[in-house]
Image (cartoon, helix red, strand yellow):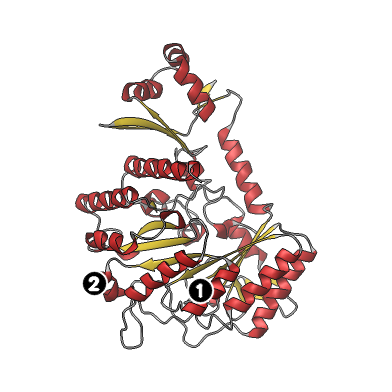
């Protein structure tokens, strides 16, 4: 037997735990036992702590001598990249948006809409894939721009048609909307109930802070109260676990109003919503110790109120980002094909076209450059204990840095806190999640 490469010991004044990123498990331990496991030879530790040794073996902290964890990571990554039975499509109903958030990376393209013709091509594409039996699950994300723009005539009928096609042949269908929430109306909610999506809806702090940032292009109309109404109505009408991610974009002022946000959502069933904290990317170099403490204190407040929280980009998937999957395509409103929705879609990000008959015409050399080599095949990644949860930097950032790892694109850079504090928060979240699962 040997110790897993991916054990991380975290010692706090209140106790200690060992996190294993290969299995994504936490084991709480006395501080001395944690230190002894970290520092002692395994044979000595097993003799001194026989019951703990057996527990660690069951949890995957101790593994067979013959087990090659890195080889398994590489193998699972190749399967997920090239042999996944999940087809993922990201659709842009428009590149336009009704809001004008100052930090948005998207360059909005006014008056753009997905036409019936392009929707028809998407439907033909999915039908072809069904005929080829190339997938068991279809996952459709609606992005933009604002994807609920003209929802009744664009995203809704397309989503409904794709859902019927897939479920008629006993395959699984899932959809996801990344929306600002400002266009959600009562009849929108009734239609969303039909298609049972997951949604990400973003706020920028309490009402005072949010309505300085997330405002309409038309007359600077505020949005906070409407978004809160929409979230409450959605969580009341749709009976589904964790189907809304409430993303809180924050800078150095936002979290000062955290108590106000909690007061707004205190009556929402916490098992229907996940709170994700995301620092506004233009302020990433403006993080002080005071800001880190404020973030940690805020996340603990939300956890104590019963909410699942997270931050950063540790996904725990066998790839860094879905764009690294061979069977993911981004389809813009004009039928052009792309591979990443983390940048504004332009002619420079184009990988091909969706043809009239639903055939994908792709530049394979561009695809190969992005996904031919796993993003974690970097010296810094291969020696990192968080590799199984991270799987390397995103392919887009790596391409923008000529394929070379830099500290700025490391996933550890996506969290404001230290790794030990990040894991301490995640440990509390896992405990809360387990409690909810036990009470189902």
Q: Is residue 217 left or right of residue 68?
A: left
Task: Tell me the residue at 66%/48% (across/down).
Answer: 79
Asked if 303 appears above or below 34 in the picture, the reply is: below
Q: Nearer the viewer, mark 2 or mark 1?
A: 1
Which one is in front, 272 or 428? Answer: 272
Q: Position of residue 157 (x, y in %)?
A: 63, 78
Res 362 visible:
no
Quadrant in the rendering for residue 419: top left
Task: Tell me the residue at 52%/59% (across/down).
Answer: 240
Q: Position of residue 68 (x, y in %)?
A: 59, 31
Q: Position of residue 390 (x, y in %)?
A: 48, 47
> Disc 2 and disc 1: Cα gap in Å?
26 Å
Disc 2 target residue: 208
Q: Is residue 251 left or right of residue 356?
A: left
Disc 1 target residue: 189
Asked if 352 appears above or below 408 in the picture, the reply is: below
Badge 2 element: helix
Q: Mark number for residue 305?
A: none
Q: Is residue 79 left or right of residue 245?
A: right
Quadrant in the rendering for residue 287: bottom left
């Amino acid at each position: 037997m040997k110790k897993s490469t991916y054990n991380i010991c975290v010692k706090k004044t209140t106790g200690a735990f060992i996190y294993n990123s290969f299995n994504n498990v936490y084991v709480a331990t006395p501080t001395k036992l944690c230190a002894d496991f970290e520092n002692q030879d395994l044979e000595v530790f097993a003799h001194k702590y026989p019951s703990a040794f057996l527990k660690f073996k069951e949890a995957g902290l101790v593994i067979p001598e013959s087990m090659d964890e890195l080889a398994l990571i590489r193998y699972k990554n190749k399967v997920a990249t090239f042999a996944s039975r999940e087809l993922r499509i990201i659709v842009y109903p428009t590149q336009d948006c009704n809001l004008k958030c100052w930090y948005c990376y998207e360059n909005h393209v006014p008056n753009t809409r997905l036409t019936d013709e392009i929707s028809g091509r998407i439907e033909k594409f999915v039908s072809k894939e069904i005929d080829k039996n190339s997938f068991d699950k279809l996952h459709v994300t609606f992005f933009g721009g604002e994807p609920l723009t003209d929802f009744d005539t664009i995203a809704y009928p397309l989503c409904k048609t794709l859902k019927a096609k897939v479920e008629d042949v006993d395959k699984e269908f899932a959809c996801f909307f990344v929306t600002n929430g400002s266009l959600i109306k009562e009849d929108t909610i009734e239609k969303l109930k039909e298609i049972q999506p997951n949604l990400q809806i973003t706020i920028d702090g309490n009402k005072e802070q949010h309505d300085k940032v997330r405002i309409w292009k038309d007359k600077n109309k505020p949005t906070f109260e409407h978004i809160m109404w929409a979230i409450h109505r959605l969580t009341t009408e749709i009976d589904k676990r964790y189907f809304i991610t409430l993303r809180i974009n924050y800078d150095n002022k936002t979290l000062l109003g955290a108590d106000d946000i909690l007061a707004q959502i205190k009556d929402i069933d916490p098992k229907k919503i996940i709170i994700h904290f995301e620092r506004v990317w233009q302020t990433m170099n403006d993080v002080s110790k005071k800001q880190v403490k404020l973030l940690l204190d805020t996340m603990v407040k939300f956890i104590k109120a019963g909410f699942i929280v997270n931050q950063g980009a540790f996904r725990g998937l066998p790839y860094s980002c879905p764009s690294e999957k061979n069977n993911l395509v981004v389809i813009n409103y004009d039928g052009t094909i792309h591979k990443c929705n983390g940048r504004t879609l332009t002619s420079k990000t184009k990988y091909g076209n969706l043809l009239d008959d639903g055939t994908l015409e792709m530049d394979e050399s561009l695809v190969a450059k992005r996904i031919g080599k796993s993003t974690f095949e970097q010296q810094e990644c291969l020696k990192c204990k968080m590799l199984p949860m991270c799987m390397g930097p995103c392919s887009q950032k790596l391409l923008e840095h000529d394929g070379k790892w830099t500290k700025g694109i490391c996933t550890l850079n996506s969290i404001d806190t230290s790794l030990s504090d990040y894991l301490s928060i995640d440990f509390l979240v896992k405990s809360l999640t387990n409690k909810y699962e036990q009470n189902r």
